[in-house]
């Protein structure tokens, strides 16, 4: 089959396209399909109009329209639709029911409603976007929030099939009257592990080769900042020579709050802020850690997320102490492939992390088991085969995902 993936934004610098779309496309292509990713490169405008090949998959960056967002939307959506239809695909798979790709999907559905022959539309969702979801985490205008909520509610039941990245999303989408056999649980997965050069990173950051290093790989918004400050301060008090390696960039200056807390609590000398790190360098930074913490508040957004960063940490064989929220409990077998904590019990995360930092043999066994559990149960090859079967069965059934006729 020839398959079009509609990307939600450009391939750079955000990680969603690289972490989810590209590996899935590459595996489908390796099994004999042809996959083309069509992206609106507003996040990387320098690539406007360019076609490139990423991991063997052709990626078409559509021409950008006007710079003003409201004016650009119809231009970009139309161009995404036109490029897709020109490829004459067997199906189109939209990633995220919002934004420019969402408008292109709405146009496609409108054409289908008019009786025109067009490729079937599939939808992938990896976040809850509307009410109580990602809308609340972005500085969208009130009009944008209403529109994104409308897109999610309107597109989802009208797609022929829906793939969801988490059990939380599986539940919510199921409540939108999507038939069970038109819904596929498709979590973020991993491919082969890439060994990183942790000692080189330690040397570059001035961290001693034998220092106990606690990793936080994050975008900061997933948890209470006060909780993070408490965890670091308490661990610093209990683990001699510990260093805190923080990889990632916040959205609202959370790094500044952490630096302020470090100064007030006395762990500023232990704090190493790496900031945003290029995807190709991430394995090296992960390999520099002995243990990782993954705080995750029990919110609707987090219950629906499928944290790709956690899969990267586990794949790097770094033992993880994480909060038992949503998809995390799918990725970690508590006590065997990692450690799960009550998200409201801050002291529990401190205690379990301190125990692990002081137990090198346990670090090694949990790290190895975490990687093995992930590769056995969440690998992109198996995910692509499952998606292939889903495409075939859903298109063969030939009915929309919604139990009623499209309106």
Image: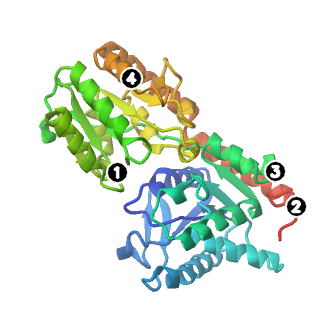
> Is tag 4's residue or tag 3's residue first in the polypeptide sequence?
3
Quick one: SS at disc 2? loop
> Is tag 1's residue or tag 3's residue first in the polypeptide sequence?
3
Residue 388 in the image: state x and y as whole percent: 69, 50
Residue at 29 percent of width and 20 percent of height: 357
Q: Which residue is mark 1?
A: 279
> Is tag 2's residue or tag 4's residue first in the polypeptide sequence?
4
> Is tag 4's residue or tag 1's residue first in the polypeptide sequence?
1
Residue at 54 percent of width and 79 percent of height: 73
Q: Are marks 2 and 1 in contact (CB under 8 Å)?
A: no
Residue 236 in the image: state x and y as whole percent: 22, 26
Please tell me whether mark 1 or mark 3 is closer to you in this view.
Answer: 3
Q: Quadrant of the N terminus?
A: bottom right
Please tell me whether mark 2 or mark 4 is closer to you in this view.
Answer: 4
Q: Which residue is mark 3?
A: 179
Quick one: SS at disc 1? helix
> Is tag 2's residue or tag 1's residue first in the polypeptide sequence?
1
Q: Which residue is mark 4?
A: 347
């Amino acid at each position: 089959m020839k398959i079009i993936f509609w990307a939600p934004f450009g391939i750079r610098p955000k990680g969603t396209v690289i972490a989810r779309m590209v590996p899935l496309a590459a595996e489908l292509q390796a099994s004999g399909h042809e996959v083309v990713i069509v992206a609106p490169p507003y996040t990387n405008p320098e690539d406007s109009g360019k076609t490139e090949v990423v991991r063997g998959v052709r990626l078409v960056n559509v021409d950008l329209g006007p710079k003003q967002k409201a004016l650009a939307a119809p231009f970009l959506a139309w161009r995404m639709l036109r490029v897709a239809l020109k490829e004459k695909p067997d199906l189109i798979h939209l990633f995220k029911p919002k934004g420019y790709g969402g408008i292109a999907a709405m146009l496609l559905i409108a054409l289908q409603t008019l009786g025109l022959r067009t490729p079937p539309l599939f939808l992938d969702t990896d976040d809850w976007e509307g009410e109580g979801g990602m809308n609340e985490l972005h500085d969208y205008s009130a009009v944008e929030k209403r529109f994104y909520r409308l897109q999610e509610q309107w597109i989802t039941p009208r797609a022929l099939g829906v793939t969801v990245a988490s059990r939380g999303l599986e539940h919510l989408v199921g409540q939108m009257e999507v038939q069970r056999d038109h819904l596929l649980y498709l979590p973020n997965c991993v491919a082969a592990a890439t060994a990183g050069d942790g000692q080189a990173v330690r040397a570059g950051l001035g961290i001693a080769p034998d220092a106990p290093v606690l990793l936080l790989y994050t975008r900061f918004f997933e948890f209470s900042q006060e909780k993070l400050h408490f965890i670091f301060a308490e661990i610093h008090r209990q683990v001699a020579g510990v260093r805190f390696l923080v990889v990632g960039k916040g959205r609202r200056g959370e790094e500044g709050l952490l630096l302020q807390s470090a100064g007030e609590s006395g762990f500023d000398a232990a704090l190493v802020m790496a900031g945003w790190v290029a995807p190709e360098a991430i394995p090296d930074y992960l390999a520099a850690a002995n243990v990782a913490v993954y705080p995750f508040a029990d919110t609707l957004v987090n219950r629906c997320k499928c944290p790709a960063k956690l899969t990267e940490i586990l794949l790097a064989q770094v033992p993880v102490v994480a909060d038992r929220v949503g998809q995390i409990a799918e990725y970690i077998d508590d006590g065997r492939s990692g450690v799960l904590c009550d998200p409201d019990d801050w002291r529990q995360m401190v205690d379990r992390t301190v125990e692990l930092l002081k137990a090198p043999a346990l670090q090694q066994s949990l790290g190895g088991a975490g990687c093995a559990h992930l590769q056995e149960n969440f690998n992109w090859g198996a995910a692509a085969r499952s998606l292939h079967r889903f495409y075939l069965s859903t298109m063969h059934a030939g009915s929309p995902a919604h139990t009623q006729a499209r309106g």
